[in-house]
Amino acid sequence: MSDQARVDVSHLDKSFPIRGGSRQVLDGVSFHALPGEFVSVIGPSGCGKSTVFNILAGLDTAEEGRVEIGGIPVEPAGSSPAKCAYMPQKDLLFPWRTVLDNTTLGLEVHGVPRKEARERARALFPVFGLSGFEDARPSQMSGGMRQRAAVLRTVVQDLPLLLLDEPFGALDSLTRTEMQNWLQQVWQQYRWTVLMITHDIREAIYLSDRVIVLSARPATVRREVQVDLPRPRDLEAMTSPEFVAIEHELLEILHEESRRALATQETPL
């Protein structure tokens, strides 16, 4: 895996203006992701997880600190070729476009000719379990299939880094479990570098090599937890003593941060 896929986040500070002053959201956030690594970011609601992702994607800027992908500083979106593909919480599929034409949007935005974009996206439909749905409309697909289409639209851009912001948060429990298994399988096949935001601790442990825990606002990195569980992982892994121990550790930290947020009248978990 090329070093182009390495991520370095160093000492990020970020505040947002509010009436009568400003509110600090990030306070020296630092972490990294190695090429081909799957890293989840968890923390109390409102602590700044999505703000970190927006900075990585070039959609926002930090007041202090540095963000590098492949050793190159991230610049504002549109000012240089993109280095990451960002999948937001909602699938954002356009209802008037076919599934195939939805999955080519990122490529088209980056100037890839439509014919080439369609060929590149179509080649991934079997891998993503979407064969036969190229000409369907999003309304004709289940929630899980729509999410697979959204992930396909993200990865077909062939960029060094994938940013997944709560990719399965809107799905029911059974579909979410199926999608977690599917994502693990395709990640092991392609070994993208992935950073994923999730509020589901079990999801973070099940999918990740490491879990980054952010504190309540203003966010700092409270803990980095290594997930040394063998791969591929199945549902039985969630009942292993090692999995349960990691889950207990993460729950304790998040409950501490939730209590701290309440004590300081910040946003609770």
Image: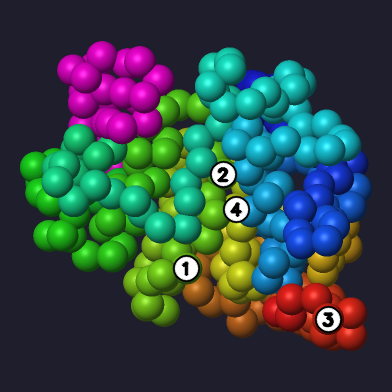
Mark 1 = which residue?
A: 169
Residue closest to the eye, 224 or 25: 25
* Mark in the foreground, 3 or 1: 3
Camera sees residue 49: yes
Name the residue that disc number 4 marks: 196
Decide: is 116 above or below 99: above
Q: 218 or 70: nearer the eye? A: 218
Front tag of 3 and 2: 3
How many residues crowd around disc 3 within 10 Å: few (fewer than 14), some, or many (20 or more)? few
Horizontal placement of 136 versus 254: left or right?
left
Q: Amino acid at mark 4?
A: Met
Residue 41 magenta-drawn? no
236 displayed left or right of 150: right
Residue 213: percent from left, percent from top: 78, 63
Q: Earlier in the sequence, mark 1 or mark 2?
A: 2
* Three-letter code, disc 1: Gly
Q: How far apart in space, not on screen, are marks 1 and 2 (Cα)?
A: 15 Å
Q: Which residue is mark 2?
A: 163
User: Is the C terminus in the top left, top right, bottom left or bottom right quadrant?
Assistant: bottom right
Measured in 3D between alpha carbons, the distance from the residue under mark 3 to the one under mark 2, in whole angstroms, is 30 Å
Residues rendered magenta in the picture: 104-127
Q: Earlier in the sequence, mark 4 or mark 2?
A: 2
Q: Residues within 10 Å of mark 1 (few under 14, many from 20)?
A: some
Q: CA distance from mark 3 to mark 1?
A: 26 Å
Q: To which residue does mark 3 refer?
A: 265
